[in-house]
Image (cartoon, coloured by chain):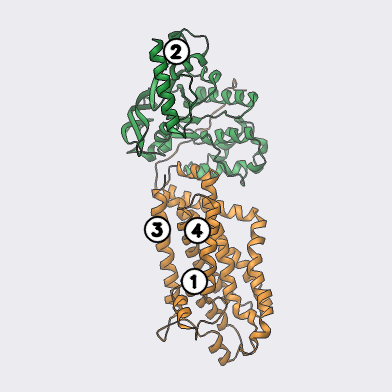
Amino acid sequence: MSAVAVEVVPVRVPERSWRSEARAVRIVWRRDLLRFATDRTRVVTLLIQPLLFLFVLGSGLQALAAASTEGVDLKTVIFPGVLCMALVFSAMFSAATLVMDREFGFLREMMVAPVRRSSIVVGKCLGGATVAALQGAIMLALAGLVHVPYDPLLLLGLFGLLLLLAFTVTAFGLLVAVRIRQLQSFTSVMQMLVMPMFFLSGALYPVSGLPTWLELLNRLNPLTYAVDPMRRLVFDHLAISDAARRTLDAGVTWFGWRVPALVEMAIVLALGLALLALAIVQFARTE
Amino acid sequence: MHSSNSPAIEVDDLVKTYGEVEAVRGVSFSVARGEVFGFLGPNGAGKSTTINMLCTLARPTSGSARVSGFDVAAERDDVRRHIGLVFQDQTLDLYLTAAQNLRMHAELYGIDPGVIPARMRQMLEMVDLWERRDQPVLTFSGGMRRRLEIARGLLHSPRVLFLDEPTVGLDPQTRSSIWDYIRALQQTEGTTIFMTTHYMDEAEQCDRIAIMDRGELVVLDTPAALKASVGADRLDDVFMHYTGSAIRDAESSSATDLNRVLTRALRGSGR
């Protein structure tokens, strides 16, 4: 080989611009989607736990819960919470890919490219969020099995809320991931953070009339403000008695004031943006 | 702006310290455009630290360096646009296909979408991977992965290509074909090659060689002149002559210090 004089296809790397940064964000985002599309094991394994909670725990505790759910299936009650759970697991897994990229070398390829570090983090965050929301959407497809109607407006609204939460949780995961160099430590740190967050969020129970200590922790937990609007939206579309609605969807209150859904969504969004900004600052400092 | 006839690489009294450790202690040299430049030295000599500074992954503690006419500290983005890198450790996404890895690179470097397919094809054909373009890199052998990394490093037509031990762990056939690519590149695109290697037969093929030891540049010349200077037939002897025969251990600095003291003492007594 080599002796043949090949016709060279000339290329040039342009100076950095908002356009080149946008392309970088897009390709980092696309990479996450590509990997999601080819990794079926990941899709399935990340669904197992939420499915166990919904169908096994939900059916198993139904007999105990029947007395207090005013005739509403427990699976219906916990459905919004389980959606969040599926999403949180997937978002954490996406954040973990940053640690894997560092451990297995690919991060270096991105670090030496003529793009801002922030573009890499933003692309990662959007990619992880999209994948997590899609994972949530797979759970959403099971709505009919737990007596939640397939109303287009409801599904669209829920998907929007999933995207919002996915963004914030991925940003949180990335903030942890930029500091950690080994996948093993990341997994255990995440386990330690995610399970308490999930249990304290009210994903599995109504958040009114809790013992004071639990109510306090619940109100401080950001995940609470993501689960609540989803539950509200689902209950808006259920044909159930007012009594059942009052018991099961009492909503999040601050000193007796019911926090509006828009405020809750604003809290989740603001938190997501703040976490992303912190992750960018931390990431820019490494190496 | 840089002028078109400035050297490809210009290093002036470059220093890098990590805490109390002086990894690079005031190195100066320059590499001409289109040159194949070999950068040698025992483990822990400061080669990787120097390369990291030249490709903007580490900031110099003091001194300066220009690559393709741009300052590595003040004009990082301009340097990055003009260099290609093939690291010692692989940096491919194993779950993506060969084509997807190259596409990702092209997008990160902002290459005009119109020319990407043709350029990708050219690079993949050069390293004989065109037929395998749609297979995941996970299924590739070590040699194929390295060839793909070289294709990727060249995709954006860099002015300077850094190769950090590009042929380590490869069989003789692959090593020789990698050298064919290096020569072809130099001819067709005028690329400057800056490479490290531990293989002296490869160093022999470089236009000029710099030997680094203990953070300092020991000697810099053509292979022939180096051999003549110590009256040796083989580059191995030149290398040993300038760096001593003590085995280096980058991790344990106390042992290295001891070796250094012993070597110096022995050399001194021999004179």
Rendered residue at 48%/17% (across/down): B240
Q: Which of marks 3 and 1 is nearer the N terminus?
A: 1
Residue type at mark 3?
Leu
What label sits on residue A278 in the rendered view?
3
Local crowd at mark 3 within 10 Å, few (<14), some, or many (≥20)? some
Mark 1: which secondary structure? loop
Chain B colour as displayed: green
Residue type at mark 2?
Leu
Residue type at mark 4?
Leu
Q: Distance between the residues labelled 4 and 3?
A: 16 Å
Quarter of the image with the N terminus of chain A in it = top right
- Residue of label 1: A223
Whether the residues at callouts 4 and 3 have beta carbons within 8 Å, the answer is no
Q: Which of marks 4 and 3 is nearer the N terminus?
A: 4
Chain identifier for the orange-coloured part of the image: A
Residue type at mark 1?
Leu
- Residue of label 4: A126
Whether the residues at callouts 2 and 1 have beta carbons within 8 Å, the answer is no
Local crowd at mark 4 within 10 Å, few (<14), some, or many (≥20)? many
Q: Which image quadrant for residue B266?
A: top left
Rendered location of residue A21, percent (x, y): 43, 49
Q: Which chain carries label 3?
A: A
- Residue of label 2: B226
Q: Mark 1 lies on which chain?
A: A
Q: How many marks?
A: 4
Q: Which chain carries label 2?
A: B
